[in-house]
Amino acid sequence: MDSFSTVIRTASHEQHVEAETSTFMSDLLGGRLGVDAYARYTEQLWFVYEALESGAERLASDPVAGPFIQPELFRLTALERDLAHLRGPRWRAGVTALPATRAYADRVRECAATWPAGYIAHHYTRYLGDLSGGQIIRDKAEKTWGFEKKGDGVRFYVFEGIANPAAFKRSYRELLDGVRADDLEKQRVVTECKRAFALNTAVFRALGEEFPLSA
């Protein structure tokens, strides 16, 4: 019988690939979009992580979600440094959430408030993605737009508190395997993982409409 972490990864593989291969992300990583598109994407991330981390402290004592609340993962402070670098010190006055981003953040906030196991689904899809594919984005951003290596502009992707990402991801998957939930609840979590990827893909689609490549 497959472990829960394997079930999640396998069941959400199609949605994961769809998100990774979106037109916007392909154009961004291919260097075909300017730094403004990267900055706009970073803005959207801020809204999602604000929803993800604003409810984290309250969930720290929860028997289901609590073990996943690990401060070394938190990204909001790094995102704010990146936005100050990308948009200037008054960046807060200018950031706006796309409707797709608002829907994503609202769902994360709803799960944080009412369904700890569902919150885990969003926690998993975001943070493990940042530790994996996010490193490709960091590398491309440094090379394409000349950010200082692991400096302002790409700090979101730099996990200074995690010395060994591979080992951390293994321990994270062990947490998933030991999550306190019955089979029905686990299936609901798998479904929420798929929803999380779909919400993320919708943000990419909206960004692609905002930054179309000229024919």
Image (tube, rainbow, N blue to C red):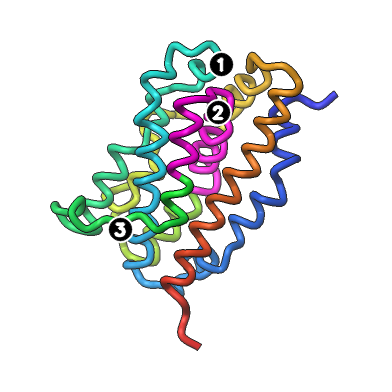
Residue range in magenta is 105-134
Say the numbered circle drawn on residue 203.
none
Which residue is nearer to you in this view: 33 or 8? 8
Q: Disc 3 versus disc 1: distance between alpha carbons?
A: 39 Å
Say the numbered circle drawn on residue 64.
1
Q: Disc 1 versus disc 2: distance between alpha carbons?
A: 8 Å
- Mark 2 or mark 3, earlier in chain: 2
Indicate yes or no whether the magenta region holds residue 140.
no
Vertical relation: 79 (above or below) 140: above
Vertical relation: 63 (above or below) 108: above
Q: Which residue is mark 3?
A: 147
The kind of residue on which mark 3 rests is Phe
Q: Which residue is mark 2?
A: 120
Q: Is residue 2 left or right of residue 207?
A: right
Q: What is the quadrant of residue 11 in the picture?
A: top right
Mark 2 or 3: in front is: 2
Which residue is nearer to you in this view: 84 or 61? 61
Q: Quadrant of the N terminus?
A: top right
Q: Residue furthest bottom?
A: 215
